[in-house]
Amino acid sequence: MAENINDEYLKKAAKKANIDINELKKAAQSGSVDDFINKNLSDSASKKLKSVLSNKDAAQKLLSTPEAKELLEKLMKGQ
């Protein structure tokens, strides 16, 4: 049941951000996440995300959240 809730959360977040979660997975698997980010986020959102990801401490803090861990796990498993 928790997985269904998480899937729904991801779907809602992707819909709100107008992002196709399957396309994000493909970009992650092919190593073209930067291109995906540039195409799918506004310039300001893209800059903010890249800034956080380029700062080791900020990225580590972001990636240590339960939601980020779960998303990464799903992306790595190819679900």
Image (spheres, rainbow, N blue to C red):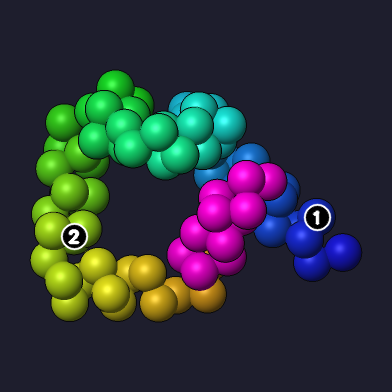
Residue 79: horizontal and vertical position, in percent? 68, 46
Q: Evaluate whether residue 70 shows in this view.
A: yes
Q: Which residue is located at x 33 percent, y 38 percent? A: 31
The answer to if 50 sits in the magenta stretch is no
Instruction: Give the class, few, some or many, for how many residues have Cα within 10 Å of label 1's Cα (few <14, many ≥20).
Output: few
Say what secondary structure mark 1 lies in.
Answer: helix
Q: Which residue is located at x 15 percent, y 38 percent? A: 44
The answer to if 78 sits in the magenta stretch is yes
Relative to 77, 57 lies left or right: left
What span is colored magenta in the figure?
A: 68-79
Residue 49: horizontal and vertical position, in percent? 23, 50
Give the amino acid type for the residue marked by disc 1 in the picture.
Asn
The one nearer the camera, 21 or 43, is 21
According to the picture, the residue beneath numbered tag 2 turns out to be 52
According to the picture, the residue beneath numbered tag 1 turns out to be 4
- Residue 60 higher or lower than 71, as above or below: below
Say what secondary structure mark 2 lies in.
Answer: helix
Q: Which residue is located at x 21 percent, y 58 percent? A: 53
Residue 76: horizontal and vertical position, in percent? 55, 54
Give the amino acid type for the residue marked by disc 2 in the picture.
Val
Rendered-image quadrant of the N terminus: bottom right
Question: Where on the picture, by quarter, is residue 42?
Answer: top left
Q: Which SS does the magenta portion mostly show?
A: helix
- Residue 61 higher or lower than 31, as above or below: below
Q: Which residue is located at x 55 percent, y 50 percent? A: 75
* Disc number for residue 69: none
